Every structure is written in C-alpha cells, then in structure tokens.
Image (cartoon, grey):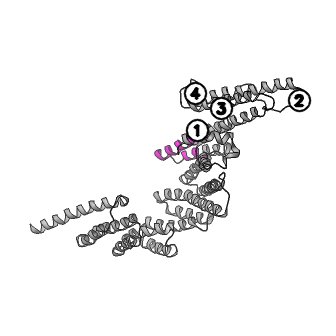
Amino acid sequence: MDCRSFREQLESAALRPEEAGADPDATGLAAHLQRCVKCRREFAVLQQAAACVRTVRALAHQLPQDEVDRMEREIMRGVRATATARGQSFPDGGAAGAHRWLWRVAVGSAALAAALVVLLCGLSFWPRERVDVPQERAGSPAPAPLEAEAATSESLVQEAQQRFEAAGRNGTPSAYAEVVDLCRRLLGAWPDSSEAEAALGLITSSYPLMADREQARTALTEHARRVGERMYASSIGLPGIPVTDELRQAAERRKLEAIRGVFSTQIDALLSRQEFGTALEYADLLRAVCPEGEPAEYAEFVLIRCLDAAGEPALAVQACEKFLGRNPRSGWGVQARTSLPAMLWNAGRRDEAVAEWKAYASGTSDPRQQACGYYNAGALAMSRGPEFFPEAIACFGRIPAGEAVEPYRSLAKAALDRLQQEMTRDVLDDGI
C-alpha cells in the first residue's frame, strides 16, 4: 500500500482512537507511521482536528444537535481541503504553505466559534453548570511540533549527508569532523526524531575515517543499541495485537538481526578498504554485545571473510570447514557453504572446489540453488582447460529449465556456445 491508501485510514484513527485496535488494518498503519515522516505529520494535524471535534461535541447539551453537527462538518471540511490542496502552488511557500494556511483557517475558525459558543451559552444559561472548554490564544495556532521538528532535523541530516559524501569525493578526512558536529547538534535538539538514527549512522561511519578508533567503537555500539531497541519496540508495540511469548521471541530475533545489520554495514566498508584488523575488532565487539544467536555466527563468519580477502585461502578454508561443522544449516552456514568452493580453488584444491559445487547442487531440491551449483561447477571445470570440457558440458546440462533459474541457464548457454567455438577451432587447427 502507498501513502495515499494509508491516509484514507488516518482520519478514522484520529477521530475514533478507541476503535483503532480492532481495525484489521491497524497493524499496517502503525508500521507505516513508524517509517513515513509525511504521514506522521498528516496524522498530527488530524489529531489536532480531532481535539477540536471533541471540544465541539462537549457542547452538545448546550446547543441544538444540528448546530453541533454543522460545526463538526466545518472543521473536517477544512482539514480535508488541506489534504486536497497539498502539492499545489501557493504564494506563501508551496505545498507546505498551503497546508499551514488552510489548517489555520479551518482550526482557527472552529476554535473561535467554540469559544464564542461557550461564552454565549454561559451567559444565557447562568448559573447552570457549564462545560470548561480550553481556549485558543488569539491568532493562528503554531504548526504542530512534529512538523517543525521534522523540517529542521531533515535539513540538518541532509546537510550532514552531503558533507559526508563530499569528504569522500575530495579526500579530506578533516571534513568528517564537521559531519560529526552537525549530527551531534541534531541529536542534542531532536534525540527522538526519525532523523536521529540516520545521524547516528553518519557518526558511526565518520569516526573510522577520522582514525578515532575509541570513538568509532562507542558510536557503533550506541547506534546498534538504538536500532535494535527501535526494532524491538516496533515489533512488539503494535495496536490490537496481544503480547505473547512467541511475539516477544520474534521481536528479540528481529532486534538481534537489526544490531547485526548495523555492524555488517560498517564491517563491509572496512573490508572494501582492506582494513582487516579493524573489521576483526568490530566482529569481536559484536560478539561481546551479542554473545549468542545470529549476530555471533556472523561475527565468526567475518573471520573467514578476512582471511580470504587478505590472501590466506588455506587458513580461510580451515576456518570455513570448522564453521560448517558447527553451523551446517544456519543462514550463515549456507553463506559459508557457497563461499567454500572459491576458497578451495584459490588454495589450489581445484578438484575439491568443483566437487563442492556439485555436492551443493545435488544436496538441495531448490531449482535455483541447483542451477547455481551446477553452473559454478561447470564454469570452474571449463576454466581448467580442454581436458575438463566434457565435465563442464555435463554440469551445464544438469541445470533445470524455467525462468526461476535465470540467469544461470542463460549464462550456461553462453558458456556452451564459447565451448563449441573453441572446440571447433581446435579441430580445425589439428586438421591444418
């Protein structure tokens, strides 16, 4: 569903929050609001309108019901006009200006009408008991705090991102300090904004490039902790869904995966810069933060990647085989299994590399994994020279048919065409 579809639910959620938990679409709406700044702003506006509607309804015992209904319609008509006008041109600042202008007209008028009704009804029915209605201050109401917050925090994080990218292009490590300062300002002013997480990510990425190892480790740990807590809260705090042990366990798994995701982003960047020692330090830090589960497996897999990338294929094969002995069927075990043939090849154990791909293909019922295994086995055999061409042809011929196995089948067909050309050329050369 897109934002337009979700916004159709926002009005109902704001006006009738007591019914939101029973709505089967409430879970999707809550998840969307977690990640969409624009819809959160719209929801904040609708919540303000809902407060005005409740104020008007509180006057039902002092006014004719028709008048109460009319005032409620006027409030909601103004708010709907706000949504309709969003994106059109207004002289005071485009779509955002249209939003503020129409909202102030709608809500300001309704608040003034409510205040006048309270005053008149109080004079007419005195000393009858009255309902205390909160009064708006003179003038237009200020924009919703969330809207003002998002605009400023967005501009800061965008500027920080631009400076981070410019520092990388220009090769000026000192510029990363400016990125950190901007992000610290954002975190100090809006620690709970949706942009605070992005700011933490930029800080985490900047410190290693400033060669500040201690600050880098601290920032990485804080960033991962915050992302993990947000993931847990969003997984367990869904409206209308009871909290069970199964839900808590699922939320904990998502939390650990989110923490690992933060670490893996930084570790991948370090490996691309061939900073293997720091990558291993981060893996050890991840193991300290999450000593068990998927993150701990990933931390062990990092050692294999570092050894392989550092040009130590024999040691990488040893570490990979030990890892597979402990984690044969886990997600990272599968990753290690598909990495092992290349390590064996680089270690000079070429027969074993081809055999490993064949074993991978024959040990699964998934057509795509079969195609992957047989294609790679054929490609390795083909690279060994003419005496291994029959083995390559046999491997390519075992790739299943169907669109689901692409691009392996197309790659195999192209390889067979090259083989045919090469074998034909060899025959012609022998004849000549």
The kind of residue tagged 4 is Gly
Comes first in the chain, label 3 or label 1? 3
Q: From which residue to which does the magenta span run?
A: 156-180
Q: Badge 3: how crowded within 10 Å, few (<14), some, or many (20+)?
A: many
The answer to which of marks 1 and 4 sits earlier in the sequence is: 4
Q: Nearer the viewer, mark 2 or mark 1?
A: 2
> Which residue type does callout 3 highlight?
Met
Q: Nearer the viewer, mark 2 or mark 3?
A: 2
Residue 261 lies, in percent from the top left, at 55, 58
Q: Where is mark 2, residue-wise? A: 128
Separation of marks 1 and 4 at Cα, in angstroms: 16 Å
Spatial separation of the CA atoms under disc 2 and disc 3: 30 Å
Mark nearer the viewer, 3 or 1: 3
Q: Which residue is mark 4?
A: 93
Q: Residues within 10 Å of mark 2 (few under 14, many from 20)?
A: few
**Along the horizontal axis of the image, is 210 left or right of 71?**
left
For the residues labelled 2 and 4, the Cα–Cα distance comes to 47 Å
Q: Percent position (x, y) of residue 349?
A: 36, 74
Question: Marks 1 and 4: which is nearer the front?
Answer: 4
The disc placed on residue 155 is: 1
Looking at the image, can residue 140 be seen? no
- Vertical side of 355 occupied by 22: above or below: above
Looking at numbered disc 2 in the image, what kind of residue is underneath it?
Answer: Arg
